[in-house]
DNA sequence: TTAATATGTCAACATGGCTGACATAAATTT
DNA sequence: AAATTTATGTCAGCCATGTTGACATATTAA
């Protein structure tokens, strides 16, 4: 349709596999903290706010909006939840008193660690299970980001889809 | 909170950086095809269906549900859209006539290619721009999955957050 | 014949995106 | 000092896409 160069047909299937691995890996990766969030009545939007505020205490609302790429309205809702439930608090900026600098409370920081822990474990496990380098390394790593109980299914899917691919190059 | 081993403090910050890189990279990666989808009145859910059906023509509805991990209801809506607009069609299973095997029409396959093209380009570019191996390779690759115009901001964020991190190990 | 399976459909609801308008206070510019 | 811009908050309302649970149909399997 557009002017894309499909000259390199050699890595075609591998690249498509990477697209799907990224989908699968991300799907599992973000699902890790869901159980914790659910008990608190929070969603993934809350998670992102807790994570980034904890990572950069004192950040402004504008900075957070820029990172998350969402609107004030969307942020406002989850931020209100987090403030009301005592995980985030705001501090008037010292040099600019219009700013409401964002910070985590002790409970907020604990929550952040709790949410981050399984993701850290997952990444460490993936890294430790991965050898090689370059392209194959990324593939390995992403594959290893998939939950062990899902790997068989993912592998079957990837292999199966490749077998049925039209122009099986490699 | 839970019994997580934070013994290995050496790779702590790097691992957190990987978490954020995965967030940023995925954010940009899935946003690639949005412009095309918007013109057709489709969303990302439609994209996923088109992609996976095109990758595995003749798959059953149950298989697709298992891959996407969504409910029948959620799938039904987007599937109906895609069928009504002529991008997907269903074929009665030959051995099992209860099945409605999923296929892309010609328009569907063209759409799939059109949606996949920028993601393939992005991955290829990232791979070609990446050297090294192992952990650093994944970091490089994910970093390079971020849009060039966003890399400065992402890098600043990662570096800035690391500088402000409590236990700056490495 | 009965039970299980594959699929479709309905109502109802929740989350978290979005727009656009508007308000306030503080900082900056004129 | 006055006017403008900036940082933030808030309101009403819309949309996409996820959820549950119930129920219907056709077909296959026991």
Image (tube, coloured by chain):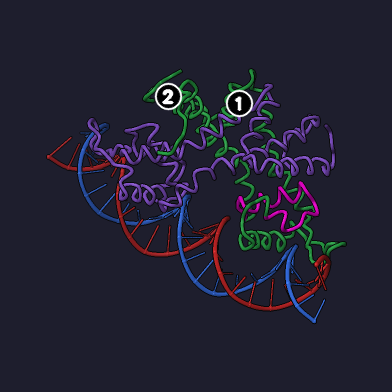
Chain colours: A purple, B green, C blue, D red
User: What residue is shown at x 35% (from left), y 40% (from top)?
Assistant: A108
Left or right of B124 in this view: B160: left
Reading the image, the residue beneath label 2 is B162
Count of numbered tags: 2
Quarter assignment of residue B86: bottom right
Q: Specify whether residue B59 is painted magenta.
A: yes
Q: Secondary structure at mark 1?
A: helix
Reading the image, the residue beneath label 1 is A128
Q: Nearer the observer, disc 1 or disc 2? A: 1
Quadrant of the rendering where the N terminus of chain B is positioned: top left
Quarter assignment of residue A55: top left
Residue B13 visible in the displayed image: no
User: Mark 1 near mark 2, Cβ–Cβ under 8 Å?
Assistant: no
Q: Position of residue A125 (x, y in %)?
A: 58, 30
Q: Specify whether residue A135 is painted magenta.
A: no
- Establish if B112 lies above or below D23: above
Q: Secondary structure at mark 2?
A: helix
User: In this picture, which residue range is highlighted in magenta?
Assistant: B42-65
Question: Subunit of mark 1?
Answer: A
User: What residue is shown at x 54% (from left), y 42% (from top)?
Assistant: A30
Same chain for labels 1 and 2? Say yes or no.
no
Most common secondary structure along the magenta stretch? helix
């Amino acid at each position: 349709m557009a002017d894309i160069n499909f000259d390199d047909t050699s890595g075609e299937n591998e690249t498509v596999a990477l697209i799907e691995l990224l989908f699968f890996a991300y799907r599992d990766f973000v699902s890790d903290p869901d159980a914790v969030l659910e008990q608190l009545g929070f969603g993934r939007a809350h998670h992102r706010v807790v994570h980034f505020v904890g990572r950069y205490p004192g950040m402004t609302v504008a900075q957070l909006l820029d990172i998350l790429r969402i609107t004030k309205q969307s942020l406002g809702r989850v931020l209100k939840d987090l403030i009301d439930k005592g995980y985030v608090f705001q501090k008037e900026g010292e040099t600019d008193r219009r700013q409401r600098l964002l910070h985590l409370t002790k409970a907020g920081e604990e929550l952040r660690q709790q949410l981050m822990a399984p993701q850290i474990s997952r990444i460490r496990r993936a890294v430790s299970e991965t050898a090689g380098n370059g392209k194959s390394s990324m593939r390995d790593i992403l594959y290893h980001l998939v939950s062990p109980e899902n790997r068989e299914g993912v592998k079957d899917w990837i292999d199966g889809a490749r077998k049925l691919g039209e122009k099986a190059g490699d």
